[in-house]
Image (cartoon, grey):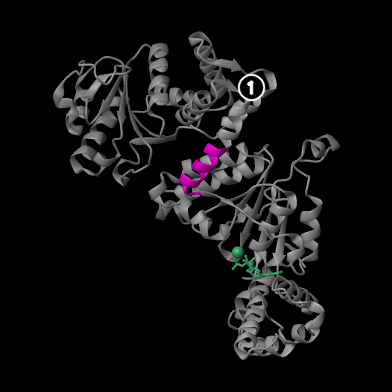
């Protein structure tokens, strides 16, 4: 239950709690319940109304004191009133930039510790100045869990049944599927999407589910953190990497009910490390098509962008949503870029990166939902050691530059991809010429060759591709030291993908 953690803080007299959530009405309701249980009054504050009793309607005139609409006035009121109370300040984060407000909050902190009052700041995003870090406790308000969603659907069904205007046809399994489908949504979002379905169909029934999934796709798009990746790649279009392909192929049905019954543990995921342009991202996409599961790409660069809310709730919501559309593949591309700063996080960002990382690791280890994680990285040195420890991923693969035979295969794949018969080319000769070239560079050589042939008005030949190969300097030339470093690291720690 979402309220439990909050109740603990209130009972332990934490003076000021910062709640990160979009769900104002759910939080307010929860506080009213808590207040009743703990024998405290509950007040809300907003910049438009000042301090008012919680639950009072917007039109109500029961505003205690007009001067409390000013942020400083509001806080002074909290300081002066003596009765046991919970104060919920809505959308207070913009005022946390004012030195006067900061000073007042610090004074309030020590005063509230000795009083039966608690100040709760509620905002969809976390913006806390350093001065307040010791005074304010940050709590991420979780999305509704299965029990809350179940209660919500029951209430809604009862309401609709009473009104008698709409039919309710939700029994056993269809009800459970709908409730599970709602996971990842806030109560408000759940209410909106079900209301829409009831109005369109004249009834509440299992047919609301597709609408719920559509709504989730919308949220995934809006969240800016996850992205539905449409993909048509297949494992046949990956040249070489035999061992990795076989491993992925074997786990095709590993997340199914049938696999559980067979006694297989739920697979966690795989980490692909290695050289740029050698097919890591390609393999993630190919696996999703091969397994016929949705591919959700987690955009790590945006996890920490304050534009889309707090990093912690971003990751939590991404995980919730991935779990709610499971079985699915969660693709964490370039994970090294996200968690590079874990060690220095305490100094650089007040521990945010470390906390987000910790949450992710815990989930990876303990998750039960059939979400398979494919993470990719090319800077091994930047990866926190905890990520590589046993039990996090089922396997760590090292994707090296392709050997001669793999290069021939990759060239064949890309010739075929451009409507050429691979047999008409001497791919062995091309492979021999392209020692040290990555898959991406081989693809590029085929494309350059095509340009040359097209401009000269003739069909593509082996020579065109050979010339293109000789004209490029592969990245591995300029990066040989880094690549050697990666290889040395991977020895004994990771399994070769080829
Ligand atoms: N083994 C391969 N077989 C076929 N094509 C490949 C292979 N490796 C790379 N390519 C081609 O190169 C492109 C880029 O590869 P990809 O994005 O998968 O590399 P990556 O390993 O993820 O690199 P980075 O570390 O830079 O993200 C692919 O879209 C594909 O067209
Ligand atoms: Mg990539």
What's the residue at 57%, 21% (across, down)? 204
Instruction: Looking at the picture, tell me which residue is in the foreground, 455 or 444.
Output: 455
Q: Residues within 10 Å of mark 1 (few under 14, many from 20)?
A: some
What's the residue at 29%, 44% (across, down)? 131
Left or right of 445 in this view: 320: left
Residue 321 drawn at (x, y percent): 56, 39
Question: Where does the magenta region start and end?
Answer: 214-225
Left or right of 141 in this view: 257: right
Q: Quadrant of residue 61?
A: top left
Q: Quadrant of residue 76?
A: top left
For disc 1, the marked residue is 175
Check if residue 224 falls in the magenta segment.
Answer: yes
Q: Is residue 47 above or below residue 250?
A: above
What's the residue at 60%, 31% (across, down)? 209
Residue 29 drawn at (x, y percent): 40, 20
Question: Can see residue 305?
Answer: yes
Instruction: Looking at the picture, tell me which residue is in the foreground, 385 or 289.
Output: 289
What's the residue at 21%, 15% (across, down)? 62
Q: Quadrant of ligand 1?
A: bottom right
Left or right of 327 in this view: 198: left
Q: Quadrant of residue 481?
A: bottom right
Residue 276 drawn at (x, y percent): 61, 70
Question: Can see residue 316?
Answer: no
Q: Is residue 33 above or below residue 100?
A: above
Residue 70 drawn at (x, y percent): 17, 31
Instruction: Looking at the picture, tell me which residue is in the foreground, 125 or 287.
Output: 287
Q: Secondary structure at mark 1?
A: helix
Secondary structure mostly seen in magenta is helix
Q: Is residue 98 above or below residue 13?
A: below
Instruction: Looking at the picture, tell me which residue is in the foreground, 118 or 321.
Output: 321
């Amino acid at each position: 239950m979402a309220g439990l953690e909050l109740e603990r803080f209130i009972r332990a007299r934490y003076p000021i709690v910062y709640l990160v959530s979009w769900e104002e009405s759910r939080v307010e309701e929860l506080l009213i319940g808590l207040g009743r249980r703990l024998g405290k009054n509950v007040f809300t504050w907003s910049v438009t109304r000042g301090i008012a009793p919680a639950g009072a309607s917007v039109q109500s005139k029961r505003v205690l004191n007009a001067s409390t609409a000013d942020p400083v006035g509001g806080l002074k009121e909290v300081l002066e009133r003596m009765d046991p109370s919970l104060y919920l300040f809505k959308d207070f984060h913009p005022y946390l930039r004012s030195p006067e407000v900061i000073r007042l909050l610090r004074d309030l902190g020590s005063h509230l510790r000795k009083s039966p009052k608690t100040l709760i700041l509620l905002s969809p995003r976390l913006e806390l100045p350093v001065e307040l870090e010791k005074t304010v406790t940050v709590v991420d308000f979780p999305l509704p869990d299965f029990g809350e969603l179940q209660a919500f659907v029951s209430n809604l069904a009862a309401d609709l049944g009473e009104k008698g205007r709409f039919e309710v046809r939700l029994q056993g399994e269809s009800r459970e599927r709908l409730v599970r489908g709602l996971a990842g949504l806030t109560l408000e979002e759940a209410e909106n999407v079900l209301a829409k379905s009831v109005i369109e169909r004249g009834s509440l029934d299992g047919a609301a589910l597709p609408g719920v999934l559509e709504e989730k796709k919308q949220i995934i798009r809006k969240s800016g953190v996850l992205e539905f990746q449409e993909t048509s790649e297949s494992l046949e279009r990956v040249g070489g990497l035999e061992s990795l392909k076989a491993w992925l192929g074997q786990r095709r049905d590993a997340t199914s009910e049938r696999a559980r019954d067979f006694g297989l543990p739920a697979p966690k995921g795989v980490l692909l490390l290695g050289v740029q342009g050698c097919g890591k991202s390609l393999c993630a996409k190919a696996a999703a098509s091969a397994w016929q599961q949705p591919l959700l790409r987690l955009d790590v660069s945006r996890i920490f962008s304050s534009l889309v809310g707090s990093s912690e709730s971003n990751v939590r919501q991404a995980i919730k949503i991935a779990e709610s559309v499971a079985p699915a593949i969660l693709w964490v591309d370039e994970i090294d870029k996200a968690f590079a700063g874990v060690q220095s996080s305490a100094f650089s960002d007040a521990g945010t990166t470390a906390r987000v990382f910790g949450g992710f690791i815990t989930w990876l280890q303990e998750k039960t939902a059939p979400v398979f994680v494919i993470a990719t990285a090319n800077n091994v040195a930047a990866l926190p050691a905890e990520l590589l420890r046993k039990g996090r991923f089922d396997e760590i693969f090292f994707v090296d530059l392709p050997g001669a035979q793999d290069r021939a295969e990759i060239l064949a794949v890309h010739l075929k991809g451009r409507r050429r018969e691979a047999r008409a080319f001497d791919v062995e000769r091309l492979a021999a010429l392209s020692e040290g070239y990555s898959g991406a560079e081989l693809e590029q050589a085929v494309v350059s060759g095509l340009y040359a042939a097209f401009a000269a008005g003739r069909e593509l030949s082996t020579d065109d591709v050979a010339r293109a190969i000789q004209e490029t300097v592969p990245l591995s030339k300029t990066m040989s030291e880094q690549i050697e470093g990666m290889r040395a690291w991977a020895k004994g720690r990771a399994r070769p993908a080829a």
